[in-house]
Image (tube, rainbow, N blue to C red):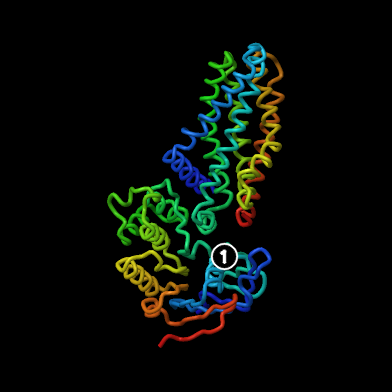
Amino acid sequence: MFRDAALVAGKDLRVEWRSRVGAQQVLPFALVVLVIFAFALDANHNLLQTAAAGLYWVAVLFAGVLTVQRSFALEAADGLRDGLRLSGLDPAGIFLGKAAAVAGQLAVLEIFLAGGIAVLYSASLHGVVLLVLSAVLATIGLAAAGTVYGIVAAGLGVRETLLPLLLLPVVAPVLLAAGKVWEITLQSGPGAWGWMRILVIFAVVYLAAGVLAFGPLLEES
Amino acid sequence: MAEAVLLRNVVALAGRFPVLAGADLTVAPGQVVLLRGANGAGKTSLLRLCAGLLPVASGQAVVLGEDLGLDRRGARRRVGLLGHATGLYDDLSVRDNVRFSVRAGGGSAREADAALALVGLTGRLADTAASRLSAGQRRRTALASVVARRPELWLLDEPYAGLDADARALLDGLVTAAVEGGASVIIASHEAGQVEELAQRTVTVAGGRTTESVLVP
């Protein structure tokens, strides 16, 4: 399973590296989202600083939807989904590989967006350990849930519009918990670890669901 | 020896539409069978069913000893399907596409490279992105993936489409070599002549049923 996951993740990341869609489209889009929030709230700079954590995760979420869509659009062309089914790869390995590739791309994007909120919102990024740990957990959860709902939407004709509709409500707990951890940490407040538990549970639940359900979902897609 | 393919009164649905409506087919190990029939007759569906891509709604379907009614994934790793779609990632090079396919099936990069050399995709062409290939080169790349995986059952859907004379001769040679190695081959093709020389039997498909089976003299 892990060998198959590494193979699929390597393939997806190689495709992204060659196509540059992440670097040339998804990342600029996410930065534009941050800029638009800055324009919208700049009249109240204190509010912008207070809301920086939430706005950061909203931008990550939007970019995450695009990344997941791209991940499954790859497999929609030219009989590639049939190729995946016939490949002999363990479906759980395919799930983990695709989720790992999405997570890898999101992690890079989050680094740039963190720089973005530091510059645009004057956010002071202290408490780095908590920020990074929560970001890792949230990214795993987003990638796992995105990959589960990505394959669900892939089998339906209106997948481009359906995926955000399916995914955004489901990942609301990640947005809430990661946003709270970052907000508390950026403001040096207590209580961040309680929210971390939600991120851990979400990631574990969707990793398990994906490992178990991806095979049947791939067959039906 | 058990049949490579044994279909008895197989019904398969695409949604609620029966794409196979009582198909019968027997393919012995080492046999080449040619499927004939008009567009929409069910040839592609028959190949997809044998590959385990189409669920069996009723009837008996056994491929390479695996009962597809019980587990349609069972035989997939031992089947090679060359369909209308080439199944290539446009942003990956020819070499990367074939290596991914071969390694997914448990093979090595060296086997992939050997298959590329066999179909004449070497040098700069092997490093070319699939999006830049001609239709014939894309089919050669897909063929290299099938060859490298050494399937026990080859399922070829209009395999000559888009191939020039050299590539057609190459394909015939590869099919002949596979059969000599014990593989079975089902070819769905409109092409007359060349493909009939390979086949030991032709089966006519119409309306989702196999209507006629003729031994080629």
The image shows residue B207, relative to residue B54, as above or below, that is below
Residue type, label 1 = Gly
The percent coordinates of residue A189 (x first, y second) are 69, 14
**Label 1: which residue?**
B52
Q: Name the spot of residue A29 as percent of width and height, x first.
A: 54, 30
Q: Nearer the viewer, residue B149 or B191?
A: B191
Residue displayed at 63% across by 41% down = A207
The residue at the point 42 percent across, 79 percent down is: B199
Identify the residue at horizontal 52%, vertical 80% (top origin).
B204
The chain containing the residue under callout 1 comes to B
The quadrant in which residue B182 appears is bottom left
Q: Quadrant of the C terminus of chain B?
A: bottom left
Above or below, A113 against B186 in this view is: above
* Percent of width and height locating residue A127: 59, 16
Q: Residues within 10 Å of mark 1 (few under 14, many from 20)?
A: many
Q: Give the side of residue B108 with respect to residue A56, left or right.
A: left
Q: In the rendered view, does B104 fall on the left or right side of B70? A: left
Extreme residue in the bottom direction: B217
Residue A91: % across, % down: 57, 52
Relative depth, front residue between B138 and A136: B138
SS under mark 1? loop
**Residue A178, image quadrant:** top right
Q: Is residue A215 above or below residue A46?
A: below
The mark total stands at 1
In this rendering, position of residue B78 left or right of residue B161? right
